[in-house]
Image (spheres, grey):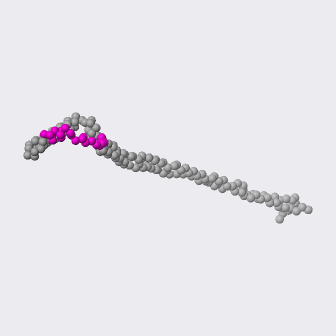
Amino acid sequence: MQLPQIRLHQTYAQIGIRTTQPVQEIHQAPADLSIKQLPSKMMIERKSSHLEIDQREAWNQLGFKSLGVLIADIADEYKQTGLEAIGEIAEEGDQLAAIENKTDAIAEISAQKGNPPPADFNIAFIPSYGSVKIHYTPTELQINWKRGGVEIDSKANKPLHQYQPGTTEVYLRQKQQLEIDFVGQHINNQI
């Protein structure tokens, strides 16, 4: 004998979730940077060296005299010669006038003039040491520096930020159900 049965078939409810991910974008622009290099400056002031050589005395000693110096030397020499001649004549006159000495003044004067003393000579370096005058002024340098530098100008840029929030949607994907079936042929419907 077959017993009547009640069959239950149940379907559970199911929910669904739809999610949209959030989107975030960040862009950082680099800073605006301006660099200017200022060059250094160097200023030089220079006074040239100066060399003076005076060799007139050396040329005079070598006999290459200028006309003015030659005339002055000849005038000095003739003046000295004239003074020496006057002195010699005065001395001879004094010898001749001194009769009281009872000497032969004329013979002595003739002997002095006839036999002159040997000429005085010596080795001389021509031109003599120090006859060339040298004067030297060295170069003078004055160096001035002006330091350069660097000018830096920077401007920071703000970041660009974009954000799109995400979403979450909850929905009913499947409804719950309960099915009841009666299985068996003889079911007493009477109570």
Residue 97, percent across and down? Answer: 8, 43
Residue 68, percent across and down? Answer: 21, 36
Q: Is residue 53 above or below residue 13?
A: above
Residue 178, percent across and down? Answer: 76, 59
Closer-to-camera residue (88/175): 88
Whether residue 162 is visible to the viewer of this picture, yes or no, is: no
Q: In the displayed structure, does residue 7 sit left or right of residue 168?
A: right
Q: In the displayed structure, does residue 27 sit left or right of residue 49?
A: right
Q: Which residues are magenta?
A: 106-128
Closer-to-camera residue (171/45): 45
- From the image, which quarter does the N terminus lie in? bottom right
Closer-to-camera residue (187/24): 24
Q: Is residue 3 above or below residue 156?
A: below
Closer-to-camera residue (133/62): 62
Which residue is painted at 81% across and 58% down in the image?
Answer: 181
Q: Is residue 18 above or below residue 45?
A: below
Q: Is residue 93 magenta?
A: no
The extreme top residue here reads 67
Q: Which is the main secondary structure of the residues drawn in magenta?
A: loop
The extreme right residue here reads 1
